[in-house]
């Protein structure tokens, strides 16, 4: 069920403290931690603590939580000093888009030029 912790979800395990992560920010509803395979000098994952499969599930089930994730991503960007130089927030939705952990999460990327299209 949407919002319920999943026993086999890596990010749910991080939220529960069962798997270590380098935490950057934490609120009542959101957790931000460094990506273990960074694609930019600043690469932080911002996740809702509640489990939602992907961005579409999160948006349809808990729109206020989407706002929490985006607000915290902005706070992380400010703390990482990428807010003045520019940053990207990316939600990969589905395996074909590169989603590998099926718990909604935003990638906050910054600290280098981020040309478009990516790749």
Image (spheres, rainbow, N blue to C red):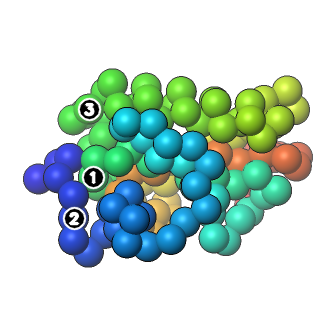
Residues marked 3 and 2 touching at CB (< 8 Å): no
Tell me what residue is drawn at x 63 percent, y 30 percent.
74
Structural distance between the alpha carbons of marks 3 and 2: 17 Å
Q: Is residue 96 visible?
A: no
Judge whether 96 appears above or below 66 on screen: below
Quarter of the view holding residue 28 = top left
Structural distance between the alpha carbons of marks 2 and 1: 7 Å
Which label lies toward us, 3 or 2? 2
Label 2: element kind: loop
Tell me what residue is drawn at x 74 percent, y 30 percent.
78
Query: Where is mark 3, residue-wise?
Result: 62
Query: Where is mark 2, residue-wise?
Result: 6
43 on left or right of 45: right
Q: Where in the figure is residue 20, as x and y percent of width and height?
A: 50, 71
Q: Point out the tag, 2 or 1, that comes first from the N-terminus.
A: 2
Residues marked 2 and 1 touching at CB (< 8 Å): yes
> Quick one: label 1, few (<14), some, or many (20+) residues within 10 Å?
many
> Quick one: label 3, few (<14), some, or many (20+) residues within 10 Å?
some
Q: Where in the figure is residue 96, as x and y percent of width and height?
A: 45, 65
> Which residue reaches farthest left?
1
Query: Where is mark 1, residue-wise?
Result: 51
Label 3: element kind: loop
> Quick one: label 2, few (<14), some, or many (20+) residues within 10 Å?
some
Judge whether 45 appears above or below 9 on screen: above
């Amino acid at each position: 069920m949407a919002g319920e912790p999943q026993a086999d979800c890596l990010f749910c395990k991080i939220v529960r403290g069962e798997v270590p992560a380098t935490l950057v920010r934490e609120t009542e509803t959101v957790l931000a931690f460094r990506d273990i395979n960074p694609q930019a000098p600043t690469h932080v994952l911002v996740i809702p603590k509640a489990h939602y499969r992907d961005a579409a599930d999160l948006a349809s089930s808990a729109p206020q939580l989407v706002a929490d994730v985006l607000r915290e991503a902005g706070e992380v960007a400010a703390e990482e000093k990428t807010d003045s130089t520019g940053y990207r927030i990316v939600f990969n939705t589905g395996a074909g888009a590169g989603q590998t952990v099926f718990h909604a999460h935003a990638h906050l990327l910054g600290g280098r030029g981020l040309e478009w299209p990516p790749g």
